[in-house]
Amino acid sequence: MTNLVQEIIMICYDQVKTVIKEVNCNILKILNLNEKNESEIKKHLANFYQDNHSSIFRFDESRFEKIRSLYKKLAEKIFAHGFTSELFNFPPEDEPETPEQTENNPSEIPQEEPPKFTVEIREEYQEQFEEMLETDDFNRFVSTVFYLCLFMLLNDPPLRVPIDNFKNRKFVYKRFKKTDYICVDGFAKENSPCLVLLPAVLRNNHPYNGIKPSVLILTEDFLTPKIVKVLQECDREEQERLAKKQEKELLQDKLEHNTNHSMIDLPHSSLNITSNLADPLSKSTNALHHNAVTLPKGLLEAGTVTADVTIKPSLNTHLEDSNLHNETLPYDPSNVPSQVSDSLFIEFS
């Protein structure tokens, strides 16, 4: 099914690309311009093409018949193909076989090789396939895909679906997650094994507008040892991704925690001092555009401040001893004037 779905998408995409080029060339011919200007005229007329797509790029019976005939011809190759790998249409050359047993390792017991993977789909699917080609549903489906491909190609930059040709096509197996995939068939249970039916639409090699890949949920009887191995690798990669994400979050939390602890909250002032944890005021002059700040008296008494400070009365503080005004003192909790009831206005020395 994966090959059949991907094949019709490729056919429609290529046909639309050809139709757009034909329209552009016809316009250039009327304007007496050569085909070197084809990309320019497409760029300038893209919005006009989108607004009038049903008239300019009419999907009529002749166009449908052309796509259906080409699809039937290419599908015949798919039905005739003998699939020998669950990972590739044409598997790469086998790896070199392990050396045979020798007298030096007689204890080794040869393991049984898993049965060869072989699938013949002609008898089971070809008759149903040919019946489907004659239905109205298939006509409507092709029409929808045709216009989707049209808008993809008229987009700037053009959108694309990363599908390889039949010879180089690989099958992609993943663990289903509703946040990452769209299930088109099967019981969509989280972490169920699935096969990617259609990849995500890309713009500049990045998924476009949150469009997710479409997948088929796989039943247990379809899981061969090779598919299980691929899924185990997916699990390992997912665990590594989550571990890195958790490590990043922990580091972010630690940074935020350190930042919060390096802030001295000043309830009697609109300013905060950000500085080194061990010596909050020693480098705060570089962090502020001010050289003075109001600190609560309790902060000084607690021994948090270790720098020499110049004491001044704050707006709402009354010092009975005027000699303390503008006096620079080495910080010592015992030096905090008892007359100060609420806060001190200090300058950095």
Image: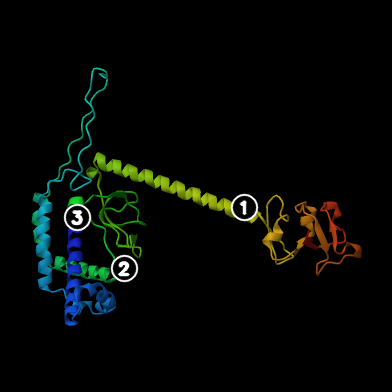
Which of 226/186 is in front? 226
**For the residue marked with disc 2, what is the amino acid?**
Pro
Q: Circle 1 sits on which residue? A: 258
Tell me the quarter of the image containing the C terminus: bottom right
Distance from disc 1 to disc 3, alpha carbons, whole Å, reads 54 Å
Residue 143 vs residue 325, the one in the foreground: 325
**In the figure, residue 39 lies in which quadrant?**
bottom left
How many numbered dots are placed on residues in this image? 3
The crowding category of the residue bearing disc 2, from other C-alpha atoms within 10 Å (few below 14, some 14 to 19, many at least 20), is few
**Amino acid type at image mark 3:** Asn
Tag on residue 157? 2
Along the polypeptide, which appears first: circle 1 or circle 3? 3
Q: Position of residue 339 (x, y in %)?
A: 87, 61
Regarding mark 1 in the picture, which secondary structure is present there? helix
Residue at the disc numbered 3: 165
Residue 117 in which image quadrant: top left
